[in-house]
Image (tube, rainbow, N blue to C red):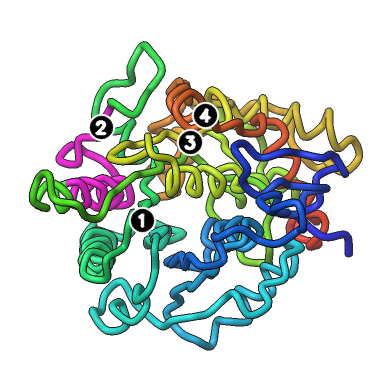
Amino acid sequence: MRHAWRDGGAERDASHGLGAVLGGRWKTDRQNGEGQATDMANELVLVTGGSGFLGAHCIAALLSDGYRVRTTIRSLDRRHDVTAALAHAGVDAGDRLSFAAADLMDDAGWHAAVDGATYVLHTASPFPPTQPKDADELVIPARYGTLRVLRAAQEAGVKRVVQTSSFAAIGYGHPILDRPYTEEDWTDPDAHVSPYVRSKTLAETAAWDFMAGIESGQEGMELAVVNPVGIFGPILGPKLSSSVQIVQRLMSGSLPGLPKVSSGVVDVRDVATLHVLAMTHPSARGQRFLASGGDAMSMQEMARVLHARLGEGASRVPTRVLPDVLLRLAALFNKSLAEDVVPRLGKVKHLANDKARTVLGWSPRTNADALVATAQSLIDFQLAGPAK
């Protein structure tokens, strides 16, 4: 099987000395002339949620840059999931990766997990396949889990925490803006929003409130936040995120047609790079960064890209646009359509990623490249076949 992290054999240089991606592999370039790793080898980074899609890619980026990494997983039985993902990313962790058992719903394990860490990347957060009836099923672990991580990090003397928030904390609960969304925009969690949107918004506001409670002027822990849109890109195992499932359904032909909805797109490798930039760049302190590869992309645009770039490999991707009225009728009998699709019909939320580009020198892949990398990795894992 061709490794899912390959990217057409093109050489890609990540900005500001982060892990360069050669042929899609994470590869460090932060070495001296003798090939010896620089002092990142003396810095330990804790990545929460290491078995997740983004968490595994963050670990790959950090290891490739020479850092030592500890990652939390709810059960140590899942260690193989992480190491297998890293193998697909072309990264050999050696003895630089360790594991700690910790759960967002439990205080146990967090102080040991963060002990000795210079930085924390907090990527862990609940993201269920369907929205629960009770929003607290997501809000409580997201909000209180974030506070557990922050308290433990502060007590351990961590230099900076980078929290993975979401566009969900930026672009909901208000009428759609007639300008691109930026980091200055905030979701109204008291509006009629989904439990997931509410959970991400309250988790991020809790983090900023926690930081505001630290004595002003006191030397101590810093916070930066990354707010990704839909995260696409190469999978590292058979477990698929919600965004990747969109491409999987397109590739497998399980969708009867294309609804008139749009989504933000960003490659998971670029989100990982942005986390590392936000972790180390002096100007990232106290800032949020919207992570998007470009402007929002419609389902029709996604389908056209897949057909143009993959040819026969995308033969099952639909081209027919579904009428809104048909979807509204179907939504009367389908809760998922009613909650996730119909409210988005014909609505476009434009996006601006200028801040991450200008402040941190971030240079993400295009939406098209992220989608094609997603689809190619699904093919490589034999997960893009016809619907059964």
At 8% across and 51% down in the image, what residue appears?
215
Give the mark nearer the N terminus: 1 vs 4: 1
Q: Is the N terminus in the top left, top right, bottom left or bottom right quadrant?
A: bottom right
Give the mark nearer the N terminus: 2 vs 4: 2
Q: Spatial distance from mark 4 to mark 3, Cα to Cα? A: 20 Å
Q: Nearer the viewer, mark 2 or mark 4?
A: 2
Image vertical order of residue 250 relative to residue 369, above or below = below
Q: Which residue is mark 4?
A: 261
Q: Which residue is mark 1?
A: 131
Relative image position of residue 174 (x, y in whole percent):
24, 26
At 88% across and 44% down in the image, what residue appears?
9
Q: Spatial distance from mark 2 to mark 1, Cα to Cα? A: 21 Å
* Pointer 2 local density, CA inside 10 Å: few below 14, some 14–19, many at least 20: some
Q: Spatial distance from mark 3 to mark 1, Cα to Cα? A: 24 Å
Circle on res. 186: 2
Kind of residue at disc 1: Gln
Give the mark nearer the N terminus: 2 vs 1: 1
Q: Spatial distance from mark 1 to mark 4, Cα to Cα? A: 19 Å
Range of magenta residues: 185-208
Q: Are marks 4 and 3 in contact (CB under 8 Å)?
A: no
Give the quadrant of residue 366.
top right
* Pointer 3 local density, CA inside 10 Å: few below 14, some 14–19, many at least 20: many
Residue located farthest toward the right when viewing the structure as drawn: 312
Give the mark nearer the N terminus: 2 vs 3: 2
Give the quadrant of residue 378.
bottom right
Q: Nearer the viewer, mark 2 or mark 3?
A: 3
Q: Nearer the viewer, mark 4 or mark 3?
A: 3
